């Protein structure tokens, strides 16, 4: 079970309670762990939200649970495959019909598994590029017309996998490199139109799907990996929430085209082998 935020976040975070009141955030991957926490923070601080995902039942369950965090919160869900832009366009249309607007977009839908290139078929590589990179493009393409109306902002969920060569991660690393590039292009093409585009790159975060898929290991390995992280521990979901809130908040109104790495300094020190 991923770590989720509770109403305690409002007591312990540094943000104003109603920071995003009247705003709407559209989230791909919001039924997963990282994007779910990002959505929770936005909702706890006043936003309404839309969670879209390939598994409609899972997205609906996440939406119901997130809505319970704040009385009066509206959290919708739609079944969407980010590889098919028509499904996103339909969800955007229904979002605007129901909630009136889209102010923020979190493009986080991702797929990953560990595999050496010798164990990676052409279709396996393409599948992850299609979900992570093409899905991010489709999400931006489908939502930017709405962001133009609200002078909104987009945050892509990136990674640090591509900063160095990393074994068994050829597919998501190539995809996330593309996502960072896409994010920067949107920043310069749409900055003059009032839209900001940034990315958040999580490192090892306790209780997330990425950690359970990629970070399995013994207590000995865990202690060793702590030693490789300058801040000496794994991150928390609250730290991902805070980074996301920062990027959408007025505190970041002069910040665009940037990747905010939330990893305790890990990528600076970790050897790929
Ligand atoms: C090698 C694999 C594989 C594996 C699938 N494939 N799993 N190859 N090792 N472990 C191959 C399949 O054999 C097939 O190729 C191709 O990939 C497509 O597989 P499908 O199962 O048909 O695709 P699909 O149903 O679309 O599923 C996509 C998926 C799956 C990415 C493969 O894992 C998925 O749906 N994941 C979504 C959830 C997820 O991964 N979350 C993790 C996010 S964490 P062939 O050639 O046989 O047809 C994250 C964090 C990253 O991203 C950062 C960490 C720090």
Image: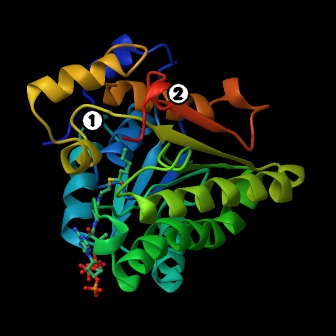
As drawn, is 214 to the left or to the right of 96? left
Name the residue at 68% across, 23% down: 251
Q: Can I make out residue 161 in this image?
A: yes
Name the residue at 63% across, 53% down: 180
Farthest-out residue, left: 218
Farthest-out residue, right: 192
Q: How far from the left and from the top, in percent, is residue 148? A: 76, 59
Q: How far from the left and from the top, in percent, is residue 120? A: 33, 75
Q: Earlier in the sequence, mark 2 or mark 1?
A: 1
Name the residue at 28% across, 53% down: 32
* Residue at disc 1, secondary structure: loop
Query: Splitting the image into four quadrants, where does ligand 1 fall?
Result: bottom left
Q: Which residue is mark 2?
A: 268
Report the coloring of the rendering: rainbow
Q: Is residue 162 above or below residue 139?
A: above
As drawn, is 73 to the left or to the right of 68? right
Comparing 139 with 208, the one in front is 208
Q: Which residue is mark 1?
A: 69
Q: How far from the left and from the top, in percent, is residue 245? A: 52, 31
* Residue at disc 2, secondary structure: helix
Name the residue at 44% across, 62% down: 170
Q: Can I make out residue 101 in this image?
A: no
Q: Is mark 1 within 8 Å of ligand 1?
A: no
How packed mark 2 is, by other alpha carbons closer than 10 Å (few <14, some 14-19, many 20 or more), is: some
Q: Is residue 81 above or below residue 113?
A: below
Q: Is residue 153 above or below residue 76?
A: above
Label drawn at residue 91 = none
As drawn, is 151 to the left or to the right of 140? right
């Amino acid at each position: 079970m991923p770590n989720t935020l509770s109403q305690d976040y409002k007591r312990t975070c540094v943000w104003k309670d109603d920071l995003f009141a009247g705003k709407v955030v559209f989230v791909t991957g919001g039924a997963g762990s990282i994007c779910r926490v990002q959505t929770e923070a936005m909702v706890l601080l006043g936003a309404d939200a839309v969670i879209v995902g390939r598994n409609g039942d899972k997205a609906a369950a996440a939406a119901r649970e997130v809505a319970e965090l704040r009385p009066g919160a509206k959290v919708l869900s739609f079944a969407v495959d980010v590889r098919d832009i028509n499904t996103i366009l339909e969800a955007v249309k229904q979002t605007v019909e129901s909630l009136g607007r889209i102010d923020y977009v979190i493009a986080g839908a991702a797929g990953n598994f560990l595999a050496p290139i010798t164990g990676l078929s052409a279709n396996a590589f393409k599948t992850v590029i299609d979900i992570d990179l093409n899905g991010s493009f489709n999400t931006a393409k489908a939502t930017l017309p709405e962001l133009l109306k609200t002078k909104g902002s987009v945050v892509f969920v990136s990674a640090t996998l591509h900063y160095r060569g990393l074994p068994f991660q050829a597919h998501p690393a190539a995809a996330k490199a593309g996502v960072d590039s896409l994010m920067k292009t949107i920043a310069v093409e749409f900055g003059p139109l009032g839209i900001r585009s940034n990315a958040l790159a999580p490192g090892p975060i306790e209780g997330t799907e990425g950690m359970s898929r990629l970070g399995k290991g013994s207590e000995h390995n865990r202690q060793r990996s702590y030693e490789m992280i300058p801040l000496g521990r794994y991150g928390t979901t609250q730290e991902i929430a805070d980074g996301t809130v920062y990027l959408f908040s007025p505190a970041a109104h002069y910040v665009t085209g940037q990747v905010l790495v939330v990893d305790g300094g890990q990528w600076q020190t970790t050897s790929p082998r």
